[in-house]
Image (spheres, coloured by chain):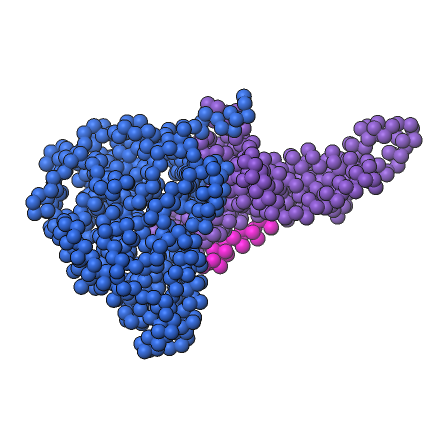
Chain colours: A purple, B blue
Amino acid sequence: MSNVFVRYFNLMLITLVILSLFSFFLAYLFPGHPIENLTGVRLADISQLENSEFKYRSGESMLVQYWHYMSALFEGNWGKSFNSGLPLYDEITNVLPASIELSSYALFLSVLVGIPLGFLAAMKHHKFTDYSLLSVSVLGYSIPVFWLALLVILIFSLQLGWFPLSGRISLFYEIPKVTGFIMLDIFLSEIEDKQAAVNNVIRHSILPTLSIALVTTTLIIRITRRSVIETMNTEFIQAAFARGLSTRQVLFRHGIRNALMPIFPLLAMQFTTLLTNAMIVETIFSWPGIGNWLIQAIYHQDYPAIRAGMLAVSALVVIFTMSIDLTIRLMDPKRRRLKRAAI
Amino acid sequence: MSCEKLIHSENEKDGIIYCSEGSPSNFNPQLDTSGTTVDASSHQIYDRLLDFDPVSGDIAPALATSWLISDDGKTYTFQLRKTVNFHSISTFTPTRTFNADDVLFSFNRWRIPTHPYHDISGGQYPYTDSLGLARLIKDIKRLNGYRVEITLHKRESSFLANLATDFAIIMSAEYAEKLVARNQMELIDHQPVGTGPYKLMDFYPDRYIRYSKHQEYWREIELTNKLIFDITPSSSLRLAKLLTSECDVIALPAHSEVEVIRQQQSLVLNEKPGLNVGFWAFNTSKPPFNNPKVRKALSMAIDRNALIEAIYFDSAIPARNLVPPTSWAYQSDIKTVSYNPIAAKKLLREQGIEEGFSMTIWAMPVERPYNPNALKMAELMQSYLLQVGINVNIVSYDWSTFRNFLTQGLHDSVLIGWSADNGDPDNFYRPLLSCDSIKSGTNRAMWCSKEYDQIINQALQFDDINERIYFYSKANEYLAEKMPILPIAHASQYQAYRKPIKGLVINPYGGIKFGGVKKH
């Protein structure tokens, strides 16, 4: 077992090192002076700075520079944004939770809707309900996220005026940042009307959550349906039927538990897809997350921000995927890899 | 809890959200003439000695209650208002009210190069530099705590108007001293202290600016508890947020969206002929654009009426002079070039510009009232100039780089413009084309003419409008002949807000004012 652990850890470490190397060389590949791209301080100011504050040694060999770059990264000194002049570490820890929050809402909603519908489709296998659910899920899966987002804005914000179309809370509420997760921050804050603030956050979250949850929901319907059909065809289920249990009894006593076991790891893997979709939807809903922030950075040619943002997102995705994969491996060692990743 | 209450809590009633178009570079309009900085600071955080009445355009008392001008027009004595409180912010609590020291500090900062604060935040004061105000003022004296005397080297009739512009703000001298002691002098422009109706609470670049009411504001006007600038660069998103009432007021509605706003029952659209000009400036320091005939020929190749239709959606009028028709220096009978590609081609060949000559048109990357879409305009002009055998490359950078490169004179020609800061025509003639304004970066034509400078300086020697008109018409003729820039349009100015907002007026002389605005 420890063998597996070491192998995964090594793989993760190597991937992260390659990512950090890539981000380091981005500073050289981007236009402008590498030191500017690394520190985010414009050259006129740099001459006034001593090397002590920014440890990048431009005179020395690449390897030494990389070493200093890495040690600065671990100290939380990620450079500054060209655009806002704020430290990138602060900026990213500000925006990343917002994206994770949005993805979590969407994952929660998808599971809540997708699993019951998947069960329904499987139980009505090859019947009208099954076929209509399947075709709806194909349709849902095929709709581009950004188009759906624009569509819901058009209908629910501009035409009906039910929901706001930008941000995650009205600017009238001043919520001091503690964790970066707005719901938590509201509970930690000392504002007067917490209920109103929470309502406001919910109203802001509904449309973006719906837009990204759709694709994941359709995926979950399909995963669940297949798993349930497989489970229902196994011999122990047939035996349960033979003992004279009703369909209802079979499903609740044996079916659900055995069908859900292989689904959960697949659900966790959806989180990275969600995060990607969330980044797209953020720009449309002006959600203050990492996707929106990165697009702004690209728009302003804010090279230090692009570099750090890319590293933060890819490292998060790598670490998350690897940890889930490892957990599954530890929980369920007998399944083969391919089977786990299939949808 | 009713549904209505769920959606609009009490919290939202005592605040106004203004969707602005960008982040200010700092909170001191002395340092930056861009409209974004002015909107975020000038009328919210600060007051001036004098103000313009937004309706009549007359100069009205503000921090100065009255003023006296000596007979030779060189000495101005201002009586200052008493019991005017400065903002109290988390890092500074004022111990005294506004007095003459604050006036001296605020003016001496840009006036005297050896002033300890002069070089803080770059040491560039584009507005006052372009008008040469520092050289004009001989001395500023404190007569007593509430009386200040300003002496000028020579008579200048636009002086009072300049003191009422968005840039002549009054800052706190006491705060400045505190910052010197703490060795944090640059904070004066980022955590400002003024006497204005709102004080700055929080600024997050590209997201928001929060202000709160100045409890002891000296003017008896209605103020809202919270004023929030929601920074939204895209104009269509601003309009969408206005429709969903996420914004109460929006900055710069696009000319193409004006019709949509008019049709909405819940919105109000204010319109006024703007005091602005959009133009095409030639870099006259570079050959062949130093040749007036080449400039004239290029101007003749452009159909300006078609540009106005396509870019401004008919919400602008074609420009004949530098100044718009609302200014008294406007001349309707001036001879301007008209669209004539054949004559243009002929004139170009005579001046030695052959078929296939290539030049750049720089198109500004941001929307401005005077030019809502410079990039599209440049593309249209590209096709017009191709007809006379000139290849055009369109150049654009992000806004701050763009302006930086323009000041260095890297362009061949540029599409840009100017919004007036006060009602005096001098505000167009001097900052745009005088020799002084090349260095301060407002003279985009890099044009320096001794004759022209002499004419516009002479105009300032007189207080009588009729006498000044004589000089400005001479200037107009001179410009029509030399053509350092081709004036294109004077665009109407719009302001859109939701019905519950009361008291918001269009300020033709620059920045938006939220003092006296309230949501009902």
Q: For the N terminus of chain A, which image quadrant?
A: top right
Query: Residue B317 versus residue B440: which sits nearer the camera?
Result: B317
Q: Residue at x 31, y 66 (%)?
A: B337
Q: Residue furthest left?
A: B71
Residue at x 23%, y 49% (from the top left corner): B424
Identify the residue at horizontal 59%, vertical 47% (top origin): A146
Q: Quadrant of residue A160?
A: top right
In magenta stretch: residue A24: yes
Q: Report the number of numbered marks.
A: 0
- On the question of residue A99 being in view, the answer is no
Locate residue A319, reporting x and y percent. Answer: 60, 43
**Residue A50 part of the magenta segment:** no
| Left or right relative to A186: residue B27 | left
Q: Is residue A260 visible?
A: yes
Tell me residue A71's x, y (percent). 48, 47
Q: Nearer the viewer, residue B36 or B303?
A: B303
Q: Position of residue B134 (x, y in %)?
A: 18, 49
Above or below for B338 versus B100: below
- In-front residue for pair A159/A110: A159
Which residues, given as a range, are shown in magenta? Answer: A15-32
Q: Residue at x 50, y 37 (%)?
A: B244
